[in-house]
Amino acid sequence: MGASAAKRIEPGFHQEAIEKMPREELEALQLHRLAATVDVVKQNVPAFSERLAKVDTPTSLDGIRDIPFTKKTDLRDNYPFGLFAVPRHEVKRVHASSGTTGKPTVVGYTAEDLTMWAQCVARCLRGAGIEPGWMLHNAYGYGLFTGGLGLHAGAEEAGISVVPVSGGNTERQLMLIEDFAPESICCTPSYALTLAEHLPGENSLQVGVLGAEPWSELMREQIEEKLSMIAVNIYGLSEVIGPGVACETADRQGLVVMEDHFYPEVVHPETGEVLDDGEVGVLVLTSLTKQAFPILRYWTGDLCSLTREPSPCGRTHARISSIVGRSDDMIVIRGVNVYPSQVEHALLGVDLAAPHFRLVVTREGTLDNLTVEVEPVEGAGTVDDIGARLSGSVSDALRSSLGIGVAVTVAEPGSLPRSEGGKLSRVDDRRTL
Ligand code: DLL
């Protein structure tokens, strides 16, 4: 039984009046909130005062174009709390994700931020067709990653009962799904495929809310077919809030952006110029209500297009397409962001390793795998002599900096690609998405 044969799932609402707000009213609200956010950042974030000194409080939404982009490096440069706009005692929670070096990028939330976030995720879950009173098997990781706790709070806000299983231990996950019979699940799409290999097609699941990594329509078809449920795409990033910035509804007609809280733009990857609706470029997001860590024009690096046409279900907020790629070299392995620069950083700490490496990304079965190829430093010995010791030290260094285990292979000295003047791609992506 494929998803098409399953019961038709209808999109619901969590804050219907806001989700269907006429665009004119929505845009007036956005402008009001944007102006307030710009003023707060100018006043309360000294690290940005110079950069924003010449920026006037916007009097139209197009005025946002005068504001410089915020990039991941800004978070790194102000690690850990330098971009927060409230005193530390008002920060009720922090989360973090991988940065471009060994240090994570840290984000913070006030009590009101946490409420707003939960409401956004509740809209996602209800829009995906999950009903209050249903059960949600939450297999996103709990911890510094925003996935587990973000989905958890959203489910509770929507009156959905949560099984906070977190990631890992597939056998136990399968047992709990069989025994508890949840109607819905959230996890990465690659993990949904792993579960699908073991779960019978006849199962309790009706809706999956999947994201945190790129996935294709082909993968959606496989997941829907094998698990007999609909698979809905949820998008978000910790810098902006976490999961729940945008999400498809059960119609699966693009990801609805929670536009009363996040202002989306799509810009040219090289010039930064704002593109017309429908054109593919880098998604740039501005938070409109966040208190602890307001963020202006955050350069997500994610490539997609935008439409402001109303959705079939009556939602008026803009929608983005699925993410079609990234403008930088970040890769996402099992929901964890990995930058080549992080690997480089970790290798620097390993005496026997040369500074040459390559990341090979493959898809074995349903899970993405990362293999790091390294070379011994000159004069350290042959691969036969020191290969095992080198790969052991590199594995340990990578596990502690990335937080995930990756395979390491040792190549002959001089065999890995060297830059020949131009940009050297250190990533060999062998997945067929
Ligand atoms: O991945 C938040 C999240 C958790 C989203 C659970 C959805 C579900 P970060 O760890 O900060 O946050 O990673 C953010 O992951 O810039 C994208 O490159 C990628 N990403 C997230 N969702 C999607 C998606 C969470 N639906 C980075 N499709 C983002 C493609 C996604 N890429």
Image (spheres, grey):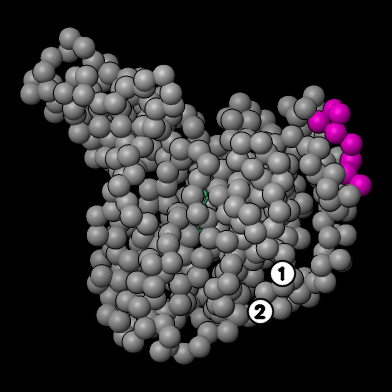
For image coordinates 71% across by 69% down, the residue present is 309
Q: Mark 1, residues whose alpha carbon is within 10 Å: few (<14), some, or many (≥20)?
A: few
Q: In this image, 244 relative to 358: left or right?
A: right
For image coordinates 70% across by 36% down, the residue present is 69
Q: Find residue 292 and name its label.
A: none
Q: Is residue 163 visible?
A: no
Q: Which residue is mark 2?
A: 312
Inspect the image, locate mark 2, and give the three-letter code of the amino acid beneath it.
Pro
Magenta span? 52-59
Q: Tell which residue pokes out farthest to the left in this image.
A: 384
Inspect the image, locate mark 1, and give the three-letter code of the amino acid beneath it.
Glu
Say which quadrant the N terminus sits in: bottom left
**In the picture shown, does residue 165 fall above or below 57?**
below
Q: In this image, 151 relative to 381: left or right?
A: right
Q: Which residue is mark 1?
A: 309
Q: Mark 2, residues whose alpha carbon is within 10 Å: few (<14), some, or many (≥20)?
A: few
- Give how far across and how far down residue 130 sits, in percent: 54, 78
- Give how far across and how far down residue 183 sits, in percent: 45, 80
**In the picture shown, does residue 385 fall above or below 59?**
above
Main SS, magenta region, reads loop
